[in-house]
Amino acid sequence: MTSPATTLASSTKLSYSDDGAALTFTAGGQQIASYTYNPTDAQYESPRPYFHPLTTLGGDEVTIFRPWDHVWHKGLSLALPNVGNDNFWCGATYTRATEYADLNNNGAMAHKAFSSISDGVAGITAAEELQWSSQDGDPVIAEKRRFNIQLLDVPGARAWALLFETEISNISPAPISIGSPTTEGRENAGYGGLFWRGPRSFTGGQFRSAAGTGTDEFMGSRSEWLAFTGRHDQSCHASTITFVEDSANLGAPNQWFARSSMFACLGSSPFFSEAVLLQAGDPLTYRYAVVISDGEVDQESAELLVGAAKAALGAWV
C-alpha cells in the first residue's frame, strides 16, 4: 500500500496527445487509453467514436476491436440500435415488423469539435460536440459529451477511472422514441448505451454486484454497479472492469446488458425494456464511471472501488 505522501494519483503523471484522429492517454509514460474520435468505419457499422485499447495500469488490454462475430463491437463506445427510425449501433435493425433486417438506416455519430481539453488535479477532461445524422445525412441528435481520465487512490488496488457523460438533444423534426430490440419484442436483447466488449480470453468470466456473483443471470438485472473479472492469455493475469451508474440518471438503477458465456460484454442499458421519448428542447443526460483495475476483486475491494468511483463522479462537475 502506498503512503499518503506517495499515492498513486500524486506519484504518476497523466498526459495526452492528439494526432488529429485520436486522443491517446498515458500514465507514467505507459498508454492506458485511446479515444478515436474520427473513425473510418463503413456506414453499415454505424461509425462512431470509441475507446480502444483500454489497458490496466499493469499493461493488460481489456478491450477488443471489431471481433469477427460482431464487427460493430469496438472497445467501449456509446451506441444505440433503435433511435426512432435510425440505427446508431450497427447493420441490421430489429423491429416488430421486420425482426432483424437491413433497413438502410445506419446513422453516424460525427465529431464536430473539442470545446475544451483540460489537465488538472482530478485528471484530464475532454468536452466534445457531436452530431448524429441519418444514413441520408439528415441531422437527428446533437450531443454534448464529456469524459475524464483519472487515477484512483484505493488501498490495495491499482486502478483508474473513465468518467463519461452524454447529453443528447433532439434536432430532428419530430419526437424520437429510443428503445432496443427488447422494446420491439425480442426477449432479453435490450442492448444500447455505453457498451464494453472484452477480450476473447474473458469469456466465462465472473460478474459481481452488491447482490453477489454469477455469470449470465445478470442479464437485465438492476443495480447501481456491476463488475466483471476476466483473465488474459499469455500473462494469465486477472483484470476487472466495473461500471458505476450515476444515481441521478433517468430510471436509475437501469438494467444491464451483461454476457459471460457467449463472450464478455457489459453495457448500461437505460432503454432495455422501456422506450424513452426524446422531445425537442428536453435533452437526456446520462453519467457513468468505468473503473479499470488490475487483478480480481472480492466484495470488499469491489465496494472500495465503487466508492472511489462515486466520489469521483460526485466531484466531477
Image: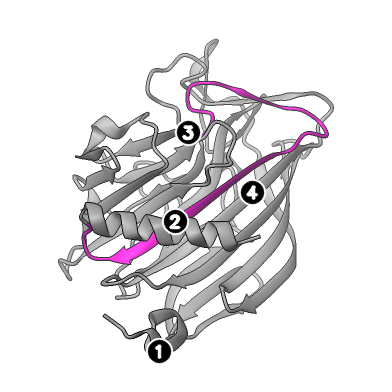
Tally the numbered discs.
4
Q: Secondary structure at mark 1?
A: helix
Name the amino acid type tagged 4: Thr
Q: Residue furthest top?
A: 97
Q: Secondary structure at mark 3?
A: loop
Which disc is residue 254 wearing? 3
Q: CA distance from mark 4 to mark 3?
A: 16 Å
Query: Where is mark 1, residue-wise?
Result: 5
Sequence-wise, which precedes: disc 2 or disc 4? 4
Q: Quadrant of residue 168?
A: top right
Query: Where is mark 2, residue-wise?
Result: 290
On whether residue 295 falls in the magenta region, the answer is: yes
Query: Where is mark 4, residue-wise?
Result: 166
Q: CA distance from mark 1 to mark 3?
A: 39 Å
Name the amino acid type tagged 3: Asn
Q: CA distance from mark 2 to mark 4?
A: 14 Å
Q: Is residue 63 visible?
A: no
In x, y percent, where is residue 309?
Answer: 45, 59
Marks 1 and 3 close (CB-CB < 8 Å): no
Sequence-wise, which precedes: disc 3 or disc 2? 3
Which disc is residue 220 wearing? none
Residue at 39%, 32% (x, y): give it: 222
Left or right for 289, reference 87:
left
Q: Is residue 194 above or below residue 252?
A: below
Looking at the image, what colour scheme do you see?
A: one colour
Q: Secondary structure at mark 2?
A: strand
Question: Foreground residue, 205 or 263?
Answer: 205
